[in-house]
Image (cartoon, grey):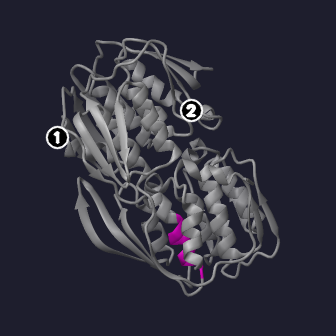
Amino acid sequence: MSKKITVKKKIENFNKIISVPGDKSLSIRWVLFSSLANGVSTAKNLLFSEDVFAAINTIKKLGIKVTFNKKVCKIYGKGFNGYRYKKNIILDAKNSGTLGRLILGLIVNSPHSIKLVGDKSLSKRDFKRIADPLTKFGVKIKLKKKRFLPITIFGSPNLKSINYIENLGSAQCKSSVIFAAMRSNGKTLIKAKKSRNHTELLSKYLKLPIQIKRKKYYDYIKVSKVSKFKPLNYDIPSDISSSAFFIVLTALSKNSKLTIKNVNINPSRSGIITILKSMGVNIILKNKKKYKGEINADIKVKTSNSLKAINCPTELNSNAIDEFLVIFLVAAKAKGVSYFKNLEELNQKESPRLIWAEKILNKMGVKTVTTKNSIKIFGNPNLVINKKIIISNFLKDHRIFMTSVIAALCFGGEWTISDKDSINTSFPNFLKVISELKK
């Protein structure tokens, strides 16, 4: 079976109601929290993707039972200190930075050394950023070239609390430290640059000893030791990062309307909605409701015929970090020059995404000016592509694949896009949903 796809035709107008899979960040966090709970946790609409299965296989290696029944997943937690496993085990985070970093915070008290590995892409990502604060708790960590996977962690039974300043806006680092703090003595104090707050919201819902003071640019978090907590039964909402591709597809297609049902619109994740609205995209949120600390809603979007450039506020960067590639497609068709800066975190993802954004836009005939952490996009409201474009060798980054498909459907041309299997990490039925819109 070919791992390439070819897109030769722009999508025709559509008016549909769709659902996208469960939120990846929440799915992975549900797996990890449930592995620590006292009792059986149940999840519906769990994302069945490679990243989530990697998390499930990881906790199974740590001695936790997991079962599936139709579309329901159950995890049989053994308590906060219930992990049981053999010496010299190897945990494989595959492509998941969320799993790779968060699991380290859960095994800081391991009585045996544990090795963590990942795929080619994950093995090129920076793990020193989480190893440094974790070592302050009293664990020992050995990294390849002092920065990369594989990692060997040597846990400690007597972890001390720490003071930690998280300046990168990395929810993964912050969450890992929160988990480690829950295993340590005393109170850990965290000053964290604004980023996704799913871990904090789930901790609050589970009534864990965590206190949060929110300021404009930083959150101040105090975490104490945890002894036990109840199971987490969760109906996981749809993923806004997956929804983003269809929001942009609808906005850039002719005479189209789309409703995406029950999407998580956590303010720390929904920067794309704020950004696209300011660029003239017609988005309405319906049926808002609060669910276990999170906010969910139906997203309605229409074709947007008058798009304008944006000087994107940097305070929205962390809230839209996984969606910038498709946001750049909107900028490509907007009137004027859009400017996005302080985006160095984009190059810390599965591939150097800022570099790839420039490559894709230039292949499309869009003028850009880039630095190591910024991009200017010179929009063309009349942009139409009438040439062949090849997208390959992008470290199997799922978001590059999906962004390229959306660009082909919106702007035309004949696109050959490699590594369609990359979508298995986050959105295995992406192409199936695309086909439903074409019917």
Please indicate, yes or no, whether residue 311 appears anywhere in the rendered image: no
Tell me the mark number nearer the camera, choosing from 2 and 1.
Answer: 1
Q: Is residue 250 magenta?
A: yes
| Residue pointed to by mark 1 | 207
Closer to the camera in the image, 277 or 387: 387
The image quadrant where one finds the C terminus is: bottom right
Mark 1, other Cα within 10 Å: few <14 / some 14–19 / many ≥20: few
Residue 221 occupies which quadrant of the picture? top left
Residue 374 in percent (x, y) is at: 61, 54
SS of the residue at dot 2? loop
Residue 142 in percent (x, y) is at: 53, 16
| Residue pointed to by mark 2 | 126
User: Above or below — where is 417 with respect to 277?
Assistant: above
User: Above or below — where is 203 with respect to 224?
Assistant: below
Residue type at tag 2: Asp
Please indicate, yes or no, whether residue 404 appears anywhere in the rendered image: yes
Q: Is residue 351 left or right of residue 155?
A: right
Q: Residue at x 75, y 54 (%)?
A: 2
SS of the residue at dot 1? loop
Q: Which residues are magenta?
A: 245-253
Q: Is residue 140 magenta?
A: no
Closer to the camera in the image, 243 or 48: 48
Disc on res. 238: none
Q: Considering the whole magenta stretch, tell me its main secondary structure.
A: helix
Query: Which comes before the other along the chain, label 2 or label 1?
Result: 2
Q: Residue at x 50, y 71 (%)?
A: 247
Q: Is residue 260 left or right of residue 188?
A: right
Residue 139 occupies which quadrant of the picture? top left
How many numbered marks, from 0 up? Answer: 2
Residue 115 in percent (x, y) is at: 51, 20
Closer to the camera in the image, 61 or 219: 61
Residue type at tag 1: Lys
